């Protein structure tokens, strides 16, 4: 898996060059650019405080502090330094820099996949609500769900252990695992779902042979998955948390109905029996 991430890293480097990448330098007339759009489908906007939203297009720069927002059936991929983030539909992600000047991403709504093919270097930050992960050499995903008691975050990993922290707590998502961060519970680890958010080859901006060569650099699972038929499909309001039955919680009366919105692409949560799949 690490070998395929390194190859993805080489491809992302070529992708950045083809897009006119390199160091992003602010001018007197614009803020600091921290990334560039490398994949896009549907309507996606970037928001900054005090400014009207701007519609994003392939190869557009993304600026420090901007909030990327995808509409229904829309997705966007952004290359920031060597880190690639692919934001699912009906999602929002704020992009910035850490104090160490590495990539800083905060998921506010929905889900995002982050691929970092580096073997070393300053750790990127991937946050969801009040939980955050330190990323280097990871293939991670973050999700925000909403249930009756409020929103909670889930951070998952498929390549190398992902450290997650929240207000003095710490947990590790090993490959194939997720750290769940609910507001009134300690962090806990659960099995990851079977289906993934988009890979670098999906929704790619038209760049000829550079994009055409991406598939050979992806893992077999990424290539076999193909286009996602029903990303962020709905889940019935009568369904409960896919990992824990509400009745498992001490003091529960089993009367609260859990509503999860949105689930990972195509559903497929462990223990959900495939419920919540595509339309």
Image (cartoon, rainbow, N blue to C red):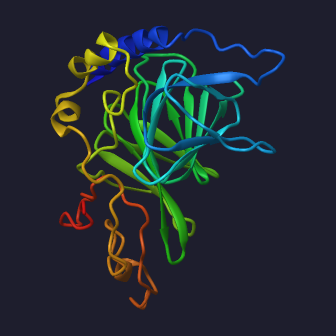
Left or right of residue 170, residue 158 in this image: left
The residue lying toward the viewer, choosing from 38 and 247, is: 38
Q: Position of residue 74 (x, y in %)?
A: 43, 46
Locate residue 63, reporting x and y percent.
67, 28
Q: Residue at x 84, y 16 (%)?
A: 28
Describe residue 105's horizontal placement relative to residue 262 as left or right.
right
Compared to residue 35, the image places residue 274 above or below, namely: below
Q: Report the number of discs.
A: 0
Q: Is residue 244 above or below residue 127?
A: below
Q: Quadrant of residue 219?
A: top left
Q: Is residue 61 visible?
A: yes
Q: State the image quarter where residue 202 is shown.
A: top left
* Quadrant placement of the C terminus: bottom left
Query: As rendered, which of 21 and 104 lies closer to the eye?
Result: 21
Name above or below for residue 20 compared with residue 258. above
Q: Quadrant of residue 25?
A: top right
- In the drawing, does residue 209 fall left or right of residue 123? left
Percent of width and height locating residue 175? 30, 39
| Quadrant showing the N terminus | top left
* Apparent side of residue 106 relative to residue 157 in the rendered image (left or right): right
- For the point 41% across and 24% down, the residue is 137
Residue at 33%, 21% in the rendered image: 5
Residue beneath the point at 42% across and 74% down: 259
Does residue 101 appear in this view?
no
Q: Position of residue 257 (x, y in %)?
A: 41, 83
């Amino acid at each position: 898996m690490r070998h395929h991430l390194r190859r993805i890293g080489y491809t992302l480097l070529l992708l950045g060059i083809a897009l006119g990448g390199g160091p992003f330098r602010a001018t007197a007339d614009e803020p600091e650019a921290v990334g560039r759009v490398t994949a896009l489908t549907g309507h996606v906007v970037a928001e900054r405080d005090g400014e009207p939203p701007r519609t994003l297009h392939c190869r557009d720069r993304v600026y420090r502090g901007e909030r990327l927002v995808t509409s229904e059936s829309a997705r966007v991929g952004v290359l920031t330094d060597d880190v690639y983030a692919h934001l699912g539909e009906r999602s929002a992600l704020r992009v910035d820099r850490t104090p160490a000047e590495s990539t800083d991403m905060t998921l506010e709504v929905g889900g995002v996949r982050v691929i970092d093919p580096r073997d070393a270097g300053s750790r990127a930050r991937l946050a969801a609500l009040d939980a955050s992960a330190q990323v280097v050499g990871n293939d991670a995903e973050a999700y925000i769900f909403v249930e009756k008691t409020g929103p909670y975050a889930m951070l998952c990993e498929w390549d190398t252990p992902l450290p997650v922290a929240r207000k003095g707590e710490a947990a590790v998502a090993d490959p194939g695992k997720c750290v769940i961060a609910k507001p009134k519970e300690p962090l806990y680890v659960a099995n990851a779902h079977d289906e993934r958010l988009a890979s670098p080859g999906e929704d790619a901006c038209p760049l000829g042979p550079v994009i055409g060569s991406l598939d050979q650099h992806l893992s077999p699972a990424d290539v076999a998955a193909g286009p996602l038929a029903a990303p962020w499909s709905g889940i019935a309001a009568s369904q409960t948390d896919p990992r824990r039955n509400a009745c498992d919680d001490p003091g529960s009366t089993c009367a609260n109905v859990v509503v999860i919105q949105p689930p990972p692409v195509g559903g497929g949560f462990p223990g959900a029996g495939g419920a919540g799949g595509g339309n």
